[in-house]
Image (tube, rainbow, N blue to C red):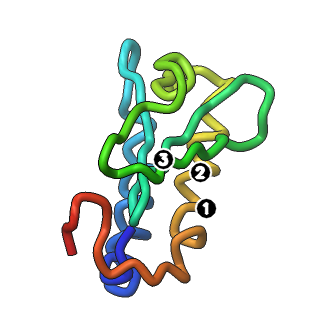
């Protein structure tokens, strides 16, 4: 998230919108969450955890997916993941609140 997206309120609004849409997703729909600032942040979901695990890729010249599809793309209907997804969407605005990134991955403002 860029400093501009945080300061303008865009990031919290997008997270609120995504949380409100979760109830409308039906199987076989799956969701993956990836955020970016000067790095790519992938969020892996594993059964039994309270929250998703962030995996950061700093190499923007040669980006890669750092973990398997089954951990990244999960069903929102699966109780093992729904709480993790909701918690992550709730926590992301605070996680990026102090960002100083004016340009984000790929050079966008």
The residue tagged 3 is: 57
In the structure shown, which secondary structural element does the residue marked by tag 1 occupy?
A: helix
Q: Residues within 10 Å of mark 2 (few under 14, many from 20)?
A: many
Residue 11 against residue 31 in the figure, above or below: below
Distance between the alpha carbons at the discs numbered 1 and 2:
5 Å
Query: Of marks 2 and 3, which one's residue comes earlier in the chain?
Result: 3
Residue 71 sits in quarter: top right
The residue tagged 2 is: 88
Q: Position of residue 4 (x, y in %)?
A: 31, 83
Q: Are marks 1 and 2 in contact (CB under 8 Å)?
A: yes
Query: Of marks 1 and 3, which one's residue comes earlier in the chain?
Result: 3
> Which residue is located at x 73 percent, y 23 percent?
47
Distance between the alpha carbons at the discs numbered 2 and 3:
18 Å
Q: Residues within 10 Å of mark 1 (few under 14, many from 20)?
A: some
Count of picture labels: 3
In the structure shown, which secondary structural element does the residue marked by tag 3 occupy?
A: strand
Residue 97 against residue 47 in the figure, above or below: below
The residue tagged 1 is: 91
């Amino acid at each position: 998230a860029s400093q501009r997206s945080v300061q303008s309120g865009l990031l919290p609004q997008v997270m609120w919108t995504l949380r409100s849409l979760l109830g409308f997703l039906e199987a076989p729909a799956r969701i993956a969450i990836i955020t970016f600032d000067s790095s790519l942040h992938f969020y892996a979901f594993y059964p039994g955890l309270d929250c998703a695990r962030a995996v950061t890729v700093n190499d923007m010249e040669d980006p890669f997916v750092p973990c398997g599809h089954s951990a990244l793309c999960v069903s929102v209907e699966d109780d093992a993941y729904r709480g993790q997804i909701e918690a992550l969407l709730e926590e992301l605005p605070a996680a990026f609140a102090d960002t100083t990134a004016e340009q984000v991955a790929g050079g966008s403002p």
